[in-house]
Image (cartoon, grey):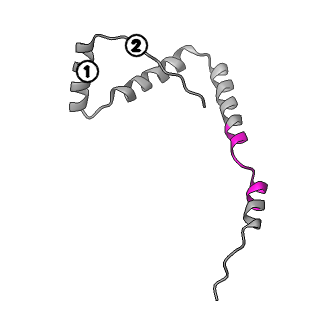
Amino acid sequence: MKKDIVRVDFNAEKLRAINLYMEKKELDLEDELMDQLQKQYEKYVPANVREYIDEKQEDEKKKRRPKKSAEKQVNANIPSIKEE
C-alpha cells in the first residue's frame, strides 16, 4: 500500500502543549491523528468505494506474495541435511 504524507501548519506553542499533555496520559499525537483520519475516511467515503479500495489492496498483496508452488520449487532445490 502506497502512503502519502499529510502536512498541517499549526501554532507551535499549541502543538507543544498538546504533546506535553498527551505524553502525561501516555498518548501519541500521530496515533490520535491517524485514528481521526480513519474516522473521516469512513464518514465521507461511500462504503462501496471503501470496499473497492480494500479489494484492490488485497489483490496487490496477493501479487507480491510468492505462490506456494514457487516456494515448493525453491525448497525442493535446497538440499536437506541428513542427520546420522
Q: Give the CA distance from mark 2 to mark 1.
A: 15 Å
The numbered mark, 2 or 1, whose residue comes first in the sequence reads: 2
The residue positioned 75% from the left and 55% from the top of the image is: 68
Residue 13 x %, y %: 22, 14
Residue 81 x %, y %: 66, 78
Residue in front for this viewpoint, 39 or 8:
8
The residue positioned 76% from the left and 66% from the top of the image is: 77
62 falls in the magenta region? yes
The quadrant of the image that shows the N terminus is top right
Residue highlighted by disc 2: 8
Location of residue 58 (image quadrant): top right
Residue 42 x %, y %: 54, 20
Q: Is residue 79 above or below residue 14?
A: below
13 falls in the magenta region? no
Residue highlighted by disc 1: 18
Location of residue 20 (image quadrant): top left
The quadrant of the image that shows the C terminus is bottom right
Residue 7 x %, y %: 43, 16
Q: Is residue 8 left or right of residue 40?
A: left
Q: Which residues are magenta?
A: 61-72
Disc 1 marks a residue whose amino acid type is Ile
